[in-house]
Image (cartoon, rainbow, N blue to C red):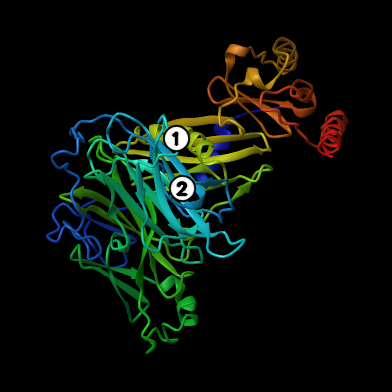
Amino acid sequence: MKRYTAKQMVLGLVLAGSLCLPSWAAAGAEPAADLRTFAQSGEKTAEKASAGMKAGKKPGSQPQAGTGRKVPASAGKKIESQALLQTAPLRKTREVDFTIQHGQLISEAIGDIDGDGREEVVDLMGNPVVEKSSFMGDMYLIVRELEAKDPAKVKYYFRPQNLGGYNAYLTLADVTGDGYPDVIIATPSGGSGGLVSFLILDVIDGKLQEVFGQEENRGISMVGTYLPGYQARLAFPTLKQDMTLDLSHEKEAYRNLNVYNEDGSLKQSGLRPYIQNLSQLSALDVNGDGVDEVITVQKVVGVLNADPLGSVRTVWEYRAGGWEPRNVGFQAELYSRPTYANAARVTGDGGYEIVSLKVATDTGAVTYPHFQKLDGKLAWKVNRVIESFVRSQLKDVTIGTRLNLDYDVKYTGKKYASLMILGLLTERDRSEAITRCYNFNMATGEEVALRDMVHPWRKFWKMAEKETAASGQMLKPEDITGYYFDGEALGLLYGDQKEYDLEAEKVLPFLTKNRPGEVFLTSQSNEGNMKKEAKMEEKREKTSK
């Protein structure tokens, strides 16, 4: 038996994360040589848009007469959004046959995107570019009413030009401020660059129309120059501000990259630092006005993708049919892990994947799990639960506070998955530990209560009370605030971030009739479960013949 606190787990997480936390500079900071960070508020920017985001390009979101669309300024119907990041290659999902087009369902979301009071099912469709390829092309969008008499009737249809990518998916968030969610599509390009193309659609004049596309994906513009003596100057025309980075700690690397000679003078290579297109896009309400702002991240590269100088974080507002940069910040990242890099990817026994998504915040580091390679409705159901929790934690972040979130995948079976989100919310000299366990039935997307995992309930608790009492802490059902099962132990959370582990050999007899129907196979697993599964498989084979 072992007993320990989740605070102990969190402490290691936070201490490790604090070494690489982004410190997006606050607005108004003065630039100076060798600064690691700088920022400039976009409120007073004369241009109010970068070269890639020109106000007035797209049609406005105000309704025309006869459309019947209501756009109250304070409309409260919000659909939870999710931070977008490139993900792993996507396998083929179930085929959906519409009379308008054949294709495979890539991703799905549900919400009232046109404000008519009825929810719509939004399906992102596509086809493999080549046979057995995970790159999906020929993408298009089909929207149907959720509870329509004719479920196959198409309400909206949109086919963008040259839309394709690995593991594309969509989400919903109101970023235009009309009170109803817009459709956000992410299509990672793959490769070392980590670029992701984003598309935002809004229902305007009874049609799905693009309000964020190829031009907007260019983000903030920048002109980079190497200077003698191992320095790099970064100029942002939109902000009318330059900064200088000190590269002297990486002299050997830059000599090897053919930028500098041994004495620190510049080689005539013509190499320049440059800024890439978008690699991240999030939709979050950062100013508390009830409307989600678009938050983007761009990677600043020295010579190669393996040579990141830093990242630019921009908060965009949708005004008068165009996008304006409201706040821009730079985070130096000399030879650290690029912002686009995926964390560990976990593949479940059922073929689904769990990947890491990141949220670009002013302070702290927020990473949370995202399920993919699932049926569209199932993925939407599971991810929305997790996303809602993350967004609720982000709402508690104010000036002077720091939020760190990360997660641990405990179990990924065919029919059951268990995860734990850990974090710390710090305000001045006070810290609050955050722990949230998720146990999903992978067939339905529903969370599985502890009572549904162990049977019979009373006998299980007699065992649990006996085991915990032997260690000086007799737990009762009402003491439990969460749980997880990782194949080796059943972790019971209780009290002030405390945890008690029941070893698998003690718990397995009570897991044979769990709600998901998972047959748990562990190092301590009984042979009975394995023999039972083999007999059932043999019976199925005989029946099929």
Give x and y (percent) for residue 220: 27, 62
Residue at the image point whose x is 62% and y is 13% from the top: 477
Label 2 amino acid? Thr
The image's mark for residue 237 is none
Neighbour tally class for label 2: few under 14, some 14-19, many 20 plus, Cα within 10 Å: few
Residue to which mark 2 is pinned: 99
Label 2 – label 1 distance at C-alpha = 12 Å
Q: Nearer the viewer, residue 488 or 411?
A: 411
Location of residue 224 (image quadrant)? bottom left
| In the image, residue 189 above or below residue 186 | below
Q: Nearer the viewer, mark 2 or mark 1?
A: 2
Q: Nearer the viewer, residue 142 or 341?
A: 142
Identify the residue at image location x=33%, y=47%: 362
**Left or right of residue 470: residue 48:** left
Checking the image for residue 151, the label placed there is 1
Quadrant where the C terminus sits is top right
For the N terminus, the quadrant is: top right
Amino acid type, residue under disc 1 in the picture: Pro
- The answer to whether one can see residue 59 in this image is yes
- Where is residue 411, by image quadrant? top right
